[in-house]
Image (tube, helix red, strand yellow):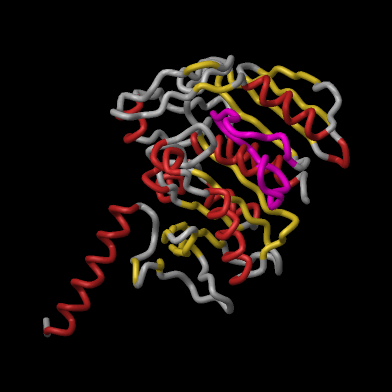
């Protein structure tokens, strides 16, 4: 084998090793995953990006399926505490949902694996990091590089990411709908503009208790202990913001669904999963979260990702 062939083989082996370790697809070159070329600034498949927000270099991942319409919907998926965008991409099955639903998914990274969602969490909250500004800048950056339907931009998140999604709903007008999973409202929402909301929460969640109040802190030094309103109270807040009727309730096995019709075709919904803990229903267990947080595996009573996407398809700004 000559030297050039040896170098080529070693490069290929290295790239495959990176793919196997990251489980995120693509060998990285210059900070961006190598994907099929596109006519604009965003390649097909998975890619990695950075931008400046508040004088800080912030990062996010993007998944762009092939065969999108001229202006595609955008879903912003916000990871939980101790997670990051790559972990959220692996754990919550949004890439495969985007393939079938024909939309783009953004996976932003919180600083030090956390979001400033109001009174939580971590270093971003303690130092006043403006994560609303970062997410706003990220959406603008994506829209500047590829066709996005600005009427169909959505936010969802897990745990601390769910709290951040709720903050975005309260303090941003970008999003047609939000869908927090295992989160609560920890910020001022007095000036919120109407938006459709779907909450998903396990009734046995001990970190963000369904009934509100202090949750059990993770088994990590300096970890936040969430103390917020009940899930039902947050839902009532959004019904008030959206001018909704009283919800109708249906029960199917372990899943109870409350749906309230609201002004201008919006809805506010709450899905509670009996006996489910602090996890994303239907998701992939996170070894790190389970080790550091002593969390149970996700419930299989509901596919949260498919349910949220179906909800998003019914709403636009």
Instruction: Compare residues 68 and 224 and report the one nearer the observer.
Output: 224
The image shows residue 227, relative to residue 24, as above or below, that is above
Q: Which residues are magenta?
A: 169-192
Q: How many marks?
A: 0
Residue 53 placement, left or right of 257: left
Magenta-drawn stretch contains 189:
yes
Q: Residue at x 59, y 71 (%)?
A: 145
Q: Quadrant of the N terminus?
A: bottom left
Q: Residue at x 46, y 61 (%)?
A: 46
Instruction: Compare residues 38 and 227 and report the one nearer the observer.
Output: 227
Picture coordinates of residue 183, whole percent (x, y): 55, 30
Instruction: Compare residues 56 and 301 and report the one nearer the observer.
Output: 56
Q: Residue at x 28, y 60 (%)?
A: 18
Residue 124 placement, left or right of 258: left
Instruction: Compare residues 128 and 196 and report the one nearer the observer.
Output: 128
Indicate the quadrant where residue 123 lies: top left
Picture coordinates of residue 130, whole percent (x, y): 52, 49
Q: Residue at x 69, y 52 (%)?
A: 174
Picture coordinates of residue 32, whole percent (x, y): 40, 68
The image shows residue 33, relative to residue 266, as above or below, that is below
Please, which residue is most extreme toward the front here?
Answer: 127
Residue 233 placement, left or right of 88: right
Magenta-drawn stretch contains 45:
no
User: Magenta stretch mostly in which secondary structure?
Assistant: loop
Picture coordinates of residue 313, whole percent (x, y): 73, 47
């Amino acid at each position: 084998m000559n030297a050039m062939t040896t170098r080529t083989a070693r490069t290929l082996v290295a790239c495959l090793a990176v793919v196997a370790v990251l489980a995120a697809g693509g060998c990285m070159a210059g900070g961006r995953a190598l994907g099929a070329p596109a006519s604009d600034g965003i390649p097909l498949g998975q890619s990695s990006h950075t931008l400046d927000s508040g004088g800080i270099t912030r990062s996010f991942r993007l998944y762009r399926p092939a065969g999108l319409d001229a202006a595609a919907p955008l879903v912003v998926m916000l990871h939980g505490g101790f997670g990051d965008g790559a972990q959220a991409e692996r754990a919550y099955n949004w890439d495969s949902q985007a393939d079938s639903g024909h939309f783009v998914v953004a996976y932003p990274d919180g600083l030090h694996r956390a979001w400033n969602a109001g009174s939580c969490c971590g270093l971003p909250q303690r130092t006043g990091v403006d994560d609303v500004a970062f997410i706003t800048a990220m959406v603008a950056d994506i829209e500047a590089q590829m066709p996005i339907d600005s009427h169909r931009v959505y936010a969802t998140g897990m745990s601390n990411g769910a709290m951040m999604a709720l903050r975005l709903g309260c303090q941003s007008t970008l999003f047609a709908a939000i869908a927090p999973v295992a989160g609560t409202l920890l910020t001022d929402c007095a000036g919120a503009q109407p938006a459709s909301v779907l909450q998903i929460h396990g009734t046995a969640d001990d970190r963000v208790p369904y009934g509100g109040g202090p949750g059990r802190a993770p088994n990590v030094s300096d970890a936040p202990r969430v103390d917020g309103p009940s899930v039902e109270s947050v839902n009532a807040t959004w019904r008030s913001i959206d001018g909704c009727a009283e919800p109708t309730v249906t029960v199917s096995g372990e899943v109870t669904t409350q749906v309230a019709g609201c002004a201008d075709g919006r809805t506010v919904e709450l899905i509670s999963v009996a006996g489910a803990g602090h996890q994303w229903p239907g998701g992939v267990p996170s070894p790190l979260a389970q080790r550091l947080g002593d969390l149970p595996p996700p419930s299989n009573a509901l596919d949260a990702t498919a349910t949220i996407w179906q909800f998003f398809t019914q709403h636009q700004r």
